[in-house]
Amino acid sequence: MRILTQNTSLLARVRTLAGQAAGRFLAQNCLLCGQTSEGEILCQACANDLPRLPASICPRCALPTTAGEPCGRCLAHPPHYDRTLAAFSYEFPLDKLIQAFKYAHHLALAAYLGREIASLASDVVADLVVPLPLHPVRLRERGFNQALELARPVAVTLGLPLDSRTCERIRHTPAQAGLSWKNREKNIRHAFQCARELSGQRILLVDDVMTTGASLNELARTLKQHGASEITLLVVARTLR
């Protein structure tokens, strides 16, 4: 009986220590404010403070309009994509999260941000999730494709196939940052290729930040040339003019 009691006590201690260790392992501090965040990468207060897009935006490109009508640019020069869904505006502190994700390799942000944008597309009828590809040179420099890391949780959450192989970036162009809207279009022209036909496919095209949308629009053009019937851009953040 004494041996049984000792073993029971030892088992209880082991369970207690295991629980404490698991608690320490699961405990996490908010990436923005440093407070305990209940196992999430952001605490609820900081998550609530992230800059959401205005309610009234152009349905095509997600820039603000007076009453949610299509903007003048999309009316005058319709893009090759059909709609844009964006969770946030690209400003503080969301911009710091994106920079930590892309340049400081905080890859845990991919799951959090991927779930955020997946929730936007819950009612979208789609057949395929496609991440914006990186050129191999840029991929080697960065070590990962941020669009692909975001697309993984999107595909899982929405129960859609993920295709990261059909589309390739075949031109290593200068960085888009700092270029004018017109020069961005020229810079990215014919930068992508598609390896198969996508006849009738409705595609969710995923990226982290949409600035002018030139890269996304060029890939959408390529996808439409290969038969895609509808393209919805799904991005974490939209840069507002």
Image (spheres, rainbow, N blue to C red):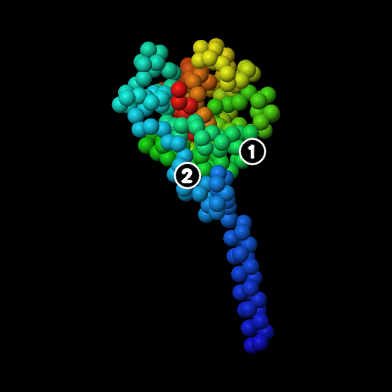
Report the number of discs.
Answer: 2
Residue 69, image x and y in percent? Answer: 32, 23
Report crowding for label 1: few under 14, some 14 to 19, many 20 or more residues within 10 A (C-alpha): some
Q: Quadrant of the N terminus?
A: bottom right
Residue 110: horizontal and vertical position, in percent?
55, 39
Image height check: is 185 above or below 25?
above
Looking at the rendered image, the disc whose residue lies closer to the viewer, 1 or 2, is: 2
Q: Which mark is residue 170?
A: none
The residue sitting at the bottom extreme is 1
Residue at left 46%, top 32%?
89
Q: Residue at x 63, y 83 (%)?
A: 5
Q: Tell me: 175 left or right of 120.
A: right
* 173 sits to left or right of 228: right
Q: Which mark is residue 47?
A: 2
Q: Is residue 61 visible?
A: yes
Disc 1 is placed on an element classified as loop
Residue at 41% across, 33% down: 53
Q: Which quadrant does the C terminus fall into? A: top left
Q: Nearer the viewer, residue 34 or 83?
A: 34
- Tell me which residue sits at (55%, 51%) in the image: 35
Cα separation, mark 1 vs mark 2, equals: 20 Å
From what the image shows, is residue 107 above or below residue 39?
above
The spot of residue 94 in percent (x, y) is 51, 36
- Residue behind mark 1: 105
